[in-house]
Amino acid sequence: MEWVPAVFIVFKVSVLGIGMFLAVKWHYDKAKREKGPGSQHAMLWAAAKVGVVFVLLLVALLFLTFGLGSMLGIDLTLP
C-alpha cells in the first residue's frame, strides 16, 4: 500500500507534463504557420514564463502545506 501514492504522483506528473508539452507544441506550430519566426519566439518566451510561474507556485504550495501541517502538529517527517 505504500507504493500507491508514489505511482499516482508519477502518473499525474507524467500526464500533466505530456499535456503541457502538447499544448506548447500545438501553439508553436500554429504560430509557425500563421505569423513567422517572430511570433514563434514570443510564444516560446510566453511558454517559458508560464512554466516558471507554475513551478514557483508548486514550490510555494509545498511550503505552505508543510507549514500548515507543522502548525497543526502533524508529523511530516520522512522515515
Image (cartoon, rainbow, N blue to C red):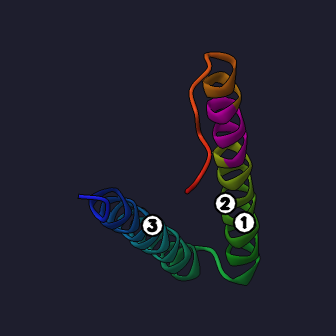
What range of the chain is rendered magenta?
59-66
User: Is there a contact, CB below 8 Å, between mark 2 and mark 1?
Assistant: yes
- Locate residue 18: give its quadrant: bottom left
Magenta region, main secondary structure: helix
Total marks drawn?
3
- Residue type marked 3: Ala
Please, is residue 17 above or below residue 60 in the view?
A: below
- Which residue does the image show at 69% across and 72% down from the upper left? 44
- Locate residue 69: give its quadrant: top right
Q: In the structure shown, which secondary structural element does the residue marked by tag 3 occupy?
A: helix
Residue neighbourhood size for the residue with mark 2, other residues' Cα within 10 Å, grouped as few (<14), some (14–19), many (≥20):
few
User: Is there a contact, CB below 8 Å, between mark 3 and mark 2?
Assistant: no
Q: Give percent across and percent down for residue 16.
A: 42, 62
Residue nearest the viewer, comparing 69 with 53: 69
Closer to the camera: disc 3 or disc 2?
2
Please, is residue 18 above or below residue 55 in the view?
A: below
Find disc 3 in the rendering and name its residue.
23
Residue sticking out furthest to the top: 72
- Locate residue 43: give its quadrant: bottom right
- Which residue does the image show at 68% across and 55% down from the upper left? 55
- Residue type marked 2: Gly
Residue neighbourhood size for the residue with mark 3, other residues' Cα within 10 Å, grouped as few (<14), some (14–19), many (≥20):
few
Residue nearest the viewer, comparing 23 with 57: 57
Distance, label 3 to label 1, CA atoms, is 13 Å
**Quarter of the image with the C terminus in it:** bottom right
- Residue type marked 1: Ala
Residue nearest the viewer, comparing 8 with 41: 8
Find disc 2 in the rendering and name its residue.
51
Find disc 1 in the rendering and name its residue.
48
Distance, label 2 to label 1, CA atoms, is 5 Å
